[in-house]
Amino acid sequence: MGGYRPGLLDRLLGAQPGARFLSPEQVKESVARDLEALLNTRTALPRQLLQAYPECAGSILNFGLADFAGLSHSSSEDRLRICSSIRQAVERHEPRLCNVQVTLAERNGTVNRIDIVIAGMLRVHGANEAVSFSAALQPSSLHYSIKRGAIA
């Protein structure tokens, strides 16, 4: 990958002042930052309300995740529901990633924390590269923190 032009939001916000092009590493950091914003935003409208309006599913009206506060993190069914919801949100709202896979990562020694791996192909200006991001969910605050690379 060579240098890439920053996205519109990055240019408007001046995330990289004076930078006309982003390095591949800066693009990955931008995706990680945007994934963290996506996962830490809760949708305001129930999914059932939007079913009658399929075009709204991919719009800003549906940006974020459903609130998982009522789900049990020890239930395999609920954990699969969380992974599916995250995958769908990433596929809808992060166009730089394709072939998105979301899996739970088992980690010994962690209490009251869920680790998730988001993997896919980063597509930027015709170039493709496999990438992964680790997302740690603190169930007490429902806050995700995202880092590049899989969980060690």
Image: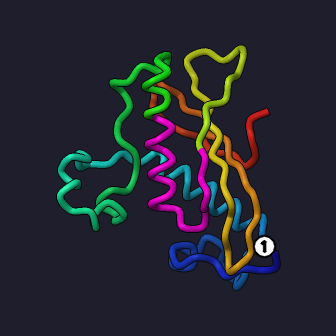
For the N terminus, which image quadrant?
Answer: bottom right
Report the span colored magenta.
82-101
**Residue at numbered disc 1:** 23
Q: Nearer the viewer, residue 121 or 151?
A: 121
Within the magenta stretch, is there residue 34?
no
Q: Is residue 61 above or below residue 11?
A: above
Question: What residue do we see at 38% from left, 31% from top?
Answer: 68
Q: Nearer the viewer, residue 28 or 143?
A: 28
Question: What residue do we see at 70% from left, 85% from top?
Answer: 20
Q: Position of residue 50 (x, y in %)?
A: 22, 55
Question: What residue do we see at 17% from left, 58% from top?
Answer: 52
- The picture quadrant where one finds residue 109 is top right
**Amino acid type of the residue that numbered disc 1 sits on in the rendered structure:** Ser
Q: Is residue 75 above or below residue 121?
A: above
For the C terminus, which image quadrant?
Answer: top right
Q: Secondary structure at mark 1?
A: loop
Q: Position of residue 58 (x, y in %)?
A: 36, 63
